[in-house]
Amino acid sequence: MKNELQDIFVVINTEFGGFSLNDEEMELWLTESGISYQVSDEKQNWSMNTSFHDEDGKFLSRYDIPRDDEVLVRLVHDNPKMFTELQIVKVPGEFRENWYIHEYDGLETVYRADYMIGEYL
């Protein structure tokens, strides 16, 4: 019997401008992830968004969420009208340790070392 590797699911940005979550999406992700946070209306230098910090005051970035985060994948899948700029890509199990997100002006695709992989859902 062949031991098959499970596919993984990755969230990418499908519009120009780059990956991030808006305030509502970020609060939902933090809550669903079980992360305690504080909200600050104090803007971070260039950002026009609300700032989020953990209980120790550490800044929580809306740009650095792991794209294969199971909570993020579930939220994007279950709330497509909320996460309109994000899409889930299925990465075949044989590539689960060998993929990366290529970004061009914010528009993203999933690649393996030398070619594009992933099936848009």
Image (spheres, helix red, strand yellow):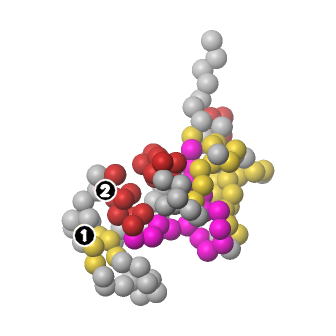
Residue 105, image x, y percentages:
68, 74
- Residue extending furthest left? 55
Which residue type carries mark 2? Thr
Q: Is residue 2 above or below residue 8?
A: above
Q: Is residue 19 above or below residue 97?
A: below
Instruction: Give SS at disc 2.
Output: helix
> Gap between marks 2 and 1, in whole Å?
11 Å
> Which residue is rendered at x = 70% and y = 69% of the image?
104
Mark 2, residues whose alpha carbon is within 10 Å: few (<14), some, or many (≥20)? few
Query: Which residue is label 1 attached to?
Result: 38
- Residue extending furthest front? 81
Query: Which residue is label 2 attached to?
Result: 31
| Residue 114 is a magenta residue | no
Say if residue 8 shows up in the picture.
yes
> Which residue is rendered at x = 48% and y = 48% of the image?
78
Task: Report the quarter where the N terminus lies.
Answer: top right
Residue 10, image x, y percentages:
57, 49
Instruction: Point out the stretch of residues depicted in magenta.
Output: 9-23
> Which residue is rendered at x = 52% and y = 48% of the image?
77
- Residue extending furthest right? 115
Left or right: 59 as drawn, with respect to 75: left
Mark 1, residues whose alpha carbon is within 10 Å: few (<14), some, or many (≥20)? some
- By secondary structure, the bulk of the magenta-drawn segment is best described as loop
Q: Is residue 64 above or below residue 114?
A: below
